[in-house]
Amino acid sequence: MITGGGPIPEVPARFVLRRGLARTHPRRKAVPRHAARKHHFKAKVPLVEIFQNILNALQFGSFYALIALGYTLVYGVLRLINFAHGDIFMVGAYLAYFVAVTLLGIGGLNLGLHMDPGLALAITVPVTMILTALVGVTLERTAYRPLRRKGADRLYVVITALMAGLVLENGNLALLGASRKRFPDMIDKVIWNLHGVTVTNLKVIVIVASILVFLLLQFIVTKTKIGMAMRGISYDKFAIPLMGIPLDTIIVVTFVLGSAMAGLAGILFAMSYPILEPYMGALIGWKAFIAAVVGGIGDIRGAIVGGFLLGFIEIGVVAVFPSTLRDLFAFSVLLIILWLRPTGIFGVAQTTKI
Amino acid sequence: MKRMTVKILFAVLALSLGAFALIGCGKDSDTIKVGFNLELTGDIPKVGEASKFAAEMLKEDINSKGGLEVGGKKYKLEFIYQDNEAKAESAVNAALKLINQDGVVAIVGPNSSKQAIPAGATCNDNQVVMVTPWSTNPDTTKDRPWVFRACFLDPFQGPVAVNFAAKQFGAKTAAVIFDIANDYSKGLAEIFKTEWEKKSGAGTVVGFESHGTKDQDFSAQLTKIIAAKPDFIFIPDDYNQVALIVKQAHDLGYKGPFMGSDAWGSAELMTLCGKDCIGQFFSTHYAAAGAQGATKEFIDRFNAKYKYVPDDVAALTWDATRLVLQAIQGAGKVDKDIKTERKLVRDALANIKEFAGITGNMKFAGTGDPQKCAVVVQISPEGKFEFKESVCPE
């Protein structure tokens, strides 16, 4: 696809400008400073509670990070904020539900299957990821590509994304009704207790999965030819096709990756918080979007750092202050970060942005 | 040319206004319209559904006998259901639509205080009777002569939960987790805290944590609560959140008991919560398991028709709707003018001093709030809500 050499390796200026990271270091002290404040309250908050909350934050941050990855991938390539992404995550959770109950033989399609939950989970994960990826690609084909072909302004595509999200939500509402679904138990819950800090096996799986996904995507984007093409399109989507890179294929790959991650997040979320409803993706989607922006939208490291940062801030605020103030404090902190660094932690200034 | 367009626009506008006016007038003199402002979609859809089912059953009962007899003439009932999406602002819009467009005589619902408090203001301002089946927050009917309810109030429910938990768990300390954005949850949490500290001394509510309506993760709040080592956790929350909170508390190693409030009592609680909720207690309006008389008859018929045991919302909607119908009959006639008719119905409803409902006897003492008993139920291993204790006001 890409013959190496030429301008392309140098092209992804936004990615190359990692040198910017060094400059950001003093500003990134926002995080340690927060932790320091926590120590100040140490008398009130015992160590066990701090460790417990770190685990809580890692778990919830994982979901933000996984969803933020999808926002950032699509934005990185298309400069499109795919506002439907939170709802793709919701669709992922529902697809996981239907695959799981079908395999377990407790609902869904009656195939007469009664699988062992462990085996069912092993099948549910890839099937859900593939199905969710299909949903993402369908969305791209039916909603975004026609607009792109007509040369519509990005603003219209973003509005289309918002509408596509609402269509997914309300389509689900019309199709399945407002009643909630309970996700079946797929793994035997084990609760480990280490000196008062409790961890469930699921929590560990969620945290490990999000880190693995990050490493995988980071590898794909920075080390493979597809990734190089993605970065290239991000830089100049008019020049890149002239070099023989199929624009549409790369965009489809981007949507496949982003949506598959949303599907994975959907399964893990449904296992951790087993109540599904059509609007479950809206709020977490927005928050993940904010996480992606704070991390520097378009940069994979930014998504993962932003996701975990948001998790830590949210949990940290509740741990130290009255829980009533959570969103107020959490988003004020994020506002300050953006105020100090409008392009996000890893982001680099651009001339045009939505 | 331009003037022509403007003229056409005006003509269209005038026509559509006329059409609106006609909707208001197109009343059939042989039917009585009652509006229902229900949570059919949104956060607590099972609540709205149960209400609608109970109302439909009652309507079929009466219409199959020729209708409701008012002043010697039988009128067919027409129930109009509006969805308030379990949102405060939509509840106001639904109420306005029922009042202005549908021209209903009275409104039943909304159920949850979050919707019932704002909708109550709307109904009171527009002088239309509103009876809420399930809203227990005092503010719903406070200083609102047009608003009534069919359930007990939180200042009564709070002490019931306090006394029961103190006795049952031998508890000295308590913790509360509640929904800050929900008037019902917040109000009841505060009443509980005041009552508990009155009983067990200041500082015995060792955790008082809140969350938002759309939240799914409560681990930080629960970590804080569990670290404070309460004897039990009080959760005055909607059933969908209860399912998540109880499970996450168990995941964080909490092994103590939970005490809930009437918002737990949905038929869907056990589908969502599963084994985590077994053995827990909550205060509610009636216990379906072991009911007798008219209550049992209602439960059996509902169960036969809709294939599940009706929850308290269904039973309370049945009572609330019957209260409204009794008031319509008590008005003595159906006035042609909808405003006069609404006034007659309100006066008749305010005149009802005692009412035998399937959720127990209600006594009204000049306000829209009945005096009635509460029950405490325990969730059995089969997921049934079993009667544990009944507490009546002195």
Image (cartoon, coloured by chain):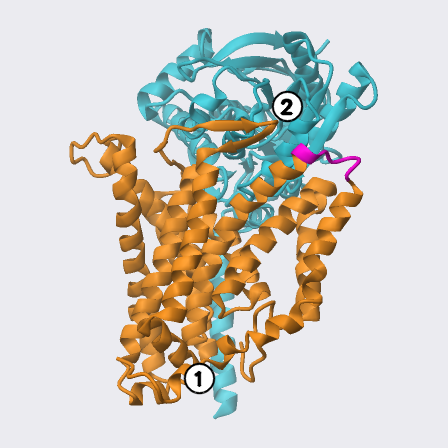
Q: Secondary structure at mark 1?
A: helix
Q: Nearer the viewer, mark 2 or mark 1?
A: 1
Establish if A294 lies above or below B192.
below
Establish if A136 lies above or below B6.
above
Q: Quadrant of residue B300?
A: top left
Q: Any idea which chain is the orange one in this picture?
A: A
Three-letter code, disc 2: Ile
Q: What residue is at 45 percent from the left and 78 percent from the top?
A: A154
Q: Which residue lies under the disc numbered 2?
A: B233
Q: What residue is at 73 percent from the left and 14 percent from the top?
A: B172
Marks 2 and 1, Cα distance to the nearest angstrom? 59 Å
Q: What residue is at 74 percent from the left and 30 percent from the top?
A: B190
Left or right: B10 in relation to A42 = left
Q: Position of residue B184 (x, y in %)?
A: 64, 33
User: In the rendered image, which quarter contains the N terminus of chain A?
Assistant: bottom left
Q: Main secondary structure of the magenta part?
A: loop
Q: Any idea which chain is the cyan one in this picture?
A: B
Q: Position of residue A138 (x, y in %)?
A: 28, 64
> How busy is the neighbourhood of tag 1: few (under 14 within 10 Å), some, or many (20 plus)?
few
Extreme bottom residue here? B1
**What segment is highlighted magenta in the picture?**
A42-48
Numbered mark located on residue A10 in the image: 1
Q: Position of residue B277 (x, y in %)?
A: 49, 22
Left or right: B89 in relation to A263 = right
Is B352 colored magenta in this rendering?
Answer: no
Disc 2: which chain? Answer: B
Residue B24 can be seen in this image: no
Left or right: B276 in relation to A136 = right
Numbered mark located on residue A263 in the image: none
The one nearer the camera, B127 or A262, is A262
